[in-house]
Image: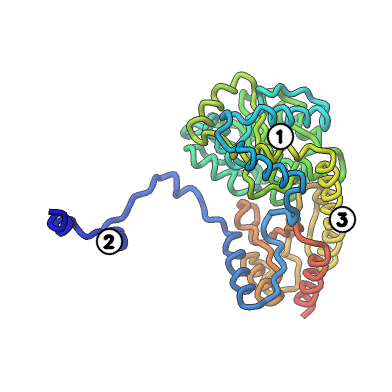
Amino acid sequence: MTEQRAASLPHLDSTSATEERALQVAARVHAIEPFHVMEVVKAAAELARGGVDVISMSVGEPDFTATGDVAEAAVAAIRAGATQYTDALGLGALRDAIAAHYASTYGLAIDRRRIVVTAGASAGLLLACAAMVGDGDEFLMPDPCYPCNRHFVSAFGGTPVLVDAGPAQRYQLDAADIDERWGARTRGVMVASPSNPTGTSMTAAQLEHMLAAVRAHGGVAIVDEIYQGLSFDAAPETALRYDADVITVNSFSKYFNMTGWRLGWLVVPDALVPVFEKLAQNLFICPSTIAQHSALACFTPASLATYEARRLEFKRRRDYLVPALRALGFMIPVMPDGAFYIYADISALAHPDAGDSAAFCMTVLRQTGVAIVPGADFGHAAPERHVRFSYATALPRIEQAVARLAQLLQQ
């Protein structure tokens, strides 16, 4: 009977079934562009497999990893069996620790109730967009900006509106941009300070006035602060100082060097806590429990001292790389004051690919083994003229990269 039943079943071949019918994806998918940086990463990996010494200045991931205290906390949590679900908003002790961090670093009293621990900053941005972006809503954001920010808006039926924000305003939106571009369908703004790809922060006055303009229009501001701890020329600032109704996004990935642990947090207005809790329960259940217990150790004196030393090392790399690139002919009109990125204009270089950043990056990779990324991912403001350098790699390797670039550009 079993053999007869088996014989009567149709033969399922997933490949042939897919070829026979086209599966239609949701329309929103077409508004999301591929991540062009991955083409460089794939090409670099292929060269490395072939034995080429590749210096990666492409991916925005610290070369530092979690501190010893964090690693030991992870092992202790696993051994203690502290691996079951937490509250959807996060472990209470971690929310308390984050609140204490705002008090000690910024002098702000943030109620732990307003803190939502998330599965990385990306999950935080997804929650923020799920809560605040409606069909057809427009969100203003600077051009250039991190590509996923605009894709998060698109994923929830909104429309990202890129506003050309050049070096004169530190590649950031200002109050005049908000007033000029605000329209009938505008719902809010999404900004980052410090920014990827430019490494620039909003000044305190710029941030305050921009938030006031959004508030005057009755909109919402979502502020990405994941590079906040990596500020080099002034004390780090937070939008929470200027507006209690702002939604801020932060992360344990960059300053705290926990990229693969996938842990971040939001600070949301008190009235919206039930909304975010409901969404977090349904979309994520909770962030990684082990990562949450581990992150408690980010705030030990030993870990904090390590993070400060690493911040100063990032600053040392920036202080070498910016003048070195300028000496080679790259135009960097604004000194990046945070994160670990440099957004450089290549149009003045004496090189045949100086008008095509994608071609330039591939030429640099193939002829020098240095991996940098073109401006195409970051917006529509002359991306063909710009490349992004990440200095999240050791200074001796950065010095080697500069020497290789110099040799290429002097040919």
Give the residue pinned by disc 3: 316
Percent of width and height locating residue 68: 77, 48
Judged from the image, the secondary structure of the residue bearing numbered disc 2 is: loop
Q: Measure the alpha-carbon separation of dots 3 and 2.
A: 57 Å
> Which amino acid type is marked by label 1?
Ala
Circle 2 packing at 10 Å, graded few (<14), some (14-19), many (20+), is few
Residue at the front extreme? 79
Residue at the spot x=56%, y=35% of the render? 84
Work out which quarter of the rendered image holds the N terminus and state it: bottom left
Percent of width and height locating residue 327: 85, 66
Give the residue pinned by disc 2: 13
Residue 104 shown left or right of residue 65 in the figure:
right
> Which amino acid type is marked by label 3?
Arg
Residue at the spot x=58%, y=33% of the render? 128
Residue depth check, mark 3 versus mark 2: number of the one nearer the observer? 2
Residue depth check, mark 1 versus mark 3: number of the one nearer the observer? 3
Q: Nearer the viewer, residue 318 or 53?
A: 53
Q: Is residue 392 above or below residue 300?
A: below
Circle 1 packing at 10 Å, graded few (<14), some (14-19), many (20+), is few
Percent of width and height locating residue 145: 65, 47
Disc number placed over residue 176 in the picture, else none: 1
Judged from the image, the secondary structure of the residue bearing numbered disc 1 is: helix
Classify residue 323 by image quadrant. bottom right
Q: Nearer the viewer, residue 278 or 178?
A: 278
Q: Nearer the viewer, residue 108 or 284?
A: 284
Q: Is residue 185 above or below residue 389?
A: above
